[in-house]
Amino acid sequence: MYNGRVIRDARLAQHLTQAELGAGICDQPAISHIENSNELPSDRIIKILLNRLNLRYSDVIDNKNVNANYALPEIEELISKQQYQLATERLKALDRDTLTTHTTLEADFLIAYVNFHLNKNYDQAIFEFNRNILGDEKQLIDPFEILSLDQLGLIYCLKKELDNARFYFQQIPDLLSKANIASNTYWITLIYHDLAFFYSRTHEYKLSNHYAKRGLELLKENHQSQFVDSLSFTIGKNYANTTQDWKKSSAKHFLQQAITFGKFKGNLDLVKRAEAIIVQHEQSYTN
């Protein structure tokens, strides 16, 4: 249930009048109604108000009956920060009756995604992601069906069953052009990241770098950095595996970039692997 008193209390704490809070959004009577009613404002208005007051949907919506339309974006944000346990708790609190066809797919994908990252149970994850894409005769165009394909490809890649992984990954590029997923930087970059990882594993380095660089470009355009360390590492490792002249190669540049962002994110395993590749090739070049 929506609680407008939270809006009022946050406004007063920031010493704003109702007119000041509503400037450019709606008039003072509308703000008064928002603060004193249990009726949820439009999605556009509530998003702007929450942003101005530094609030979250969970602050104004009773978690006992969470409307998926407002909870899912926050859950995705938790996942992007690798806060999987908190995401699981929020997913369990969802009111499934509020889900649409699309948000049902989204919620089911997020459940499978956090379960996989928490439990690392490949067989269960394969079942859950397959459940998101089977039983529908229409062409796959929903973003979360495509993301399920991506995760199935990744799981088989991690299991070193590369032919099975290729079955899923090779479907994704064409489907991406038909789905409305480009607006979600985190998920589209995740897909590029996983494609780059797979094609590096199969020694298709040019194709791997193509997807990794697309991911880096997308992150730069949107001023984000979630996957910069691992994407840079993949490119640097690919160049290192194919270069004939270490000094003229771009490998060191990308590996140093991976180290910088890896240290910032605390990804010390990646940092060690990148440093080891640099040391190995520096020694080979001088010998």
Image (cartoon, rainbow, N blue to C red):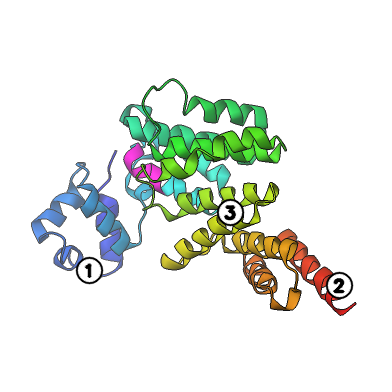
Residue 51: image quadrant is: bottom left
Secondary structure beneath label 1: loop
Residue at 66 percent of width and 27 percent of height:
123
Q: Quadrant of the C terminus?
A: bottom right
Question: Residue 128: x percent and y percent?
Answer: 55, 28
Q: Nearer the viewer, residue 138 or 101?
A: 138
**Residue beneath label 2, please?**
284
What is the CA distance from the residue labelled 1 to the residue labelled 2?
A: 65 Å
Secondary structure beneath label 3: helix
What is the CA distance from the residue labelled 3 to the residue labelled 1?
A: 54 Å
Discs 1/2, front: 2
Q: Earlier in the sequence, mark 3 or mark 2?
A: 3
Mark 1, Cα crowd under 10 Å, few <14 / some 14-19 / many 20+, is some
**Residue beneath label 1, please?**
16
What range of the chain is rendered magenta?
Answer: 68-73
**Residue beneath label 3, please?**
207
Q: Residue furthest top?
A: 135
Q: Residue furthest right?
A: 287
Question: Residue 111: x percent and y percent?
Answer: 51, 35
In the image, what residue type sits under mark 1? Leu
